[in-house]
Image (cartoon, helix red, strand yellow):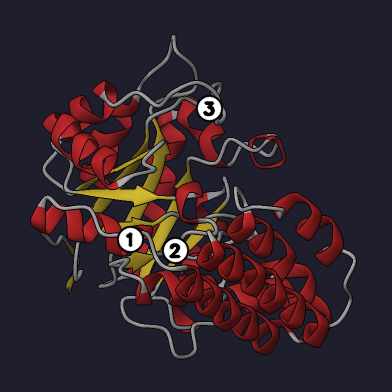
Amino acid sequence: MSIRIGPYTLVNNLVLAPMAGVTDRPFRQLCREMGAGLAVSEMVSSNSLLWGSEKTKRRANHEGENEPRSVQIMGADPAMMAEAARYNIDNGAQIIDINMGCPAKKVCNVQAGSALLRDEALVGRILDAVVGAAGDLPVTLKIRTGWDSQSRNGVNIARIAESAGIQALAVHGRTRADGYTGEAEYQTIASIKESITIPVIANGDITTPQKAKAVLEACGADAVMIGRAAQGRPWIFREIAHYLATGELLAEPSLEEVRDILLGHLSNLYAFYGEYTGVRMARKHISWYSKGRRHGGAFRQAINRVEGAEQQLQMVQEFFMQLIDQQEAA
C-alpha cells in the first residue's frame, strides 16, 4: 500500500519520523534503503539567525537523497515560518513538514511545537502562511492529539489543517502533557481520520510489524510513522513492509548483517560530519545497535571513551566477531 502527498506517490506507507539529533542525512538514507517510503528531516528552526550555522546547513543538506525530500520546520511566527519554508525549498526540500508535535520544553517554552495546539487561530495563520509560501509544493503537518487529556482538540486542528491546504497529517497518539510516557492511544487518531479526507499517518509506540498492522486497522490510517523503534533497528521498515504484504514475519537479520549495516552507517557518519563530530554522533547509534546484546553494557562503556574513527570501527568489528563466535559455539 502506498500513499500520495501532493505530486509524490510514496513506494509504501511507512514513514520515518523526524527526530532531533537522529534523522540526519546518513540515517534518513539508511532507513530509505531498508524500506521506509519517506524519511523526514530533523527540524530546522524558523529563526533565520540560525540558518548560517553548520548545524542548520547540515540539516538542510540533501545531496544524494531519494525523492521526495521532506524537511520539517519549527516556529510560532507565521511570517518567519513562511520564510523558513522558502529557504528550505531553495535548498532542495520538496515537501515542507510543520512541527506542531514536539513536546520538548525548549520548544514549547517558545510557544512552538505542540504548544501551538492551545491556539487554534494561530495554527490557522501559520498553516495559511506556509502553504502560501510553498506554492506548488506540498505541506504536511505533525501534531499530537491535543495539549492535555482535557483538551484533545486534534479533530479541530485536523479540520483547520485540511481547509488550509495541508496535504497529509501525522498524529502522535499522545498529548503534549504525556510527553513520551504511558501508552499511545489511537481512538483520537481514528476520529481525526473520520473527520478529514487527506492522508492520516498514525504515530506512537509502533515497535513491531504486528503493531503496525493493528494500528493501521484501528485508526483506519493511511500510513504509519516509526520513530524511536527505528533507532539501532533501521530494518524495522522492511520487516513491517513484508508483514503487511504477506502476513509473514521476516527472520531477524543475522549478526553479520547487523554488523555490516552498522559499519556502513558509521562510515557515512564520518563522511558527513568529519571524523571528530562523526565519532561523537556515532556513539548513540552504536549504543542502540548493541542494546540487549551480550556484554553490550561493558562494550558501550569502553567504546564511548574512544576518540578516533579507526579505533571505533575496530571495536565494533571485534564486538560483533565475539558475538558471532559465541553464537557458532552454542
Compare residues 311 and 149 and report the one nearer the observer: 311
Q: Nearer the viewer, mark 2 or mark 3?
A: 2
Neighbour class for label 1 at 10 Å: few (<14), some, many (≥20)? many
For the image, the number of numbered tags is: 3
Quarter of the rendering occupied by the N terminus? bottom left
Q: Which disc number belongs to residue 234?
A: 2
x and y, in percent, of residue 18 in the image? 49, 56
Neighbour class for label 3 at 10 Å: few (<14), some, many (≥20)? many
C-alpha separation, residue under disc 2 versus residue under disc 3: 27 Å
x and y, in percent, of residue 16 in the image? 40, 59
The quadrant in which residue 52 appears is bottom right
Compare residues 5 and 264 and report the one nearer the observer: 264
Give the residue pinned by disc 3.
176
The quadrant in which residue 158 appears is top left
* 315 on left or right of 328: right
C-alpha separation, residue under disc 2 versus residue under disc 1: 7 Å
Q: Residue at x 38, y 27 (%)?
A: 145
Q: Nearer the viewer, mark 1 or mark 3?
A: 1
Give the residue pinned by disc 1.
237
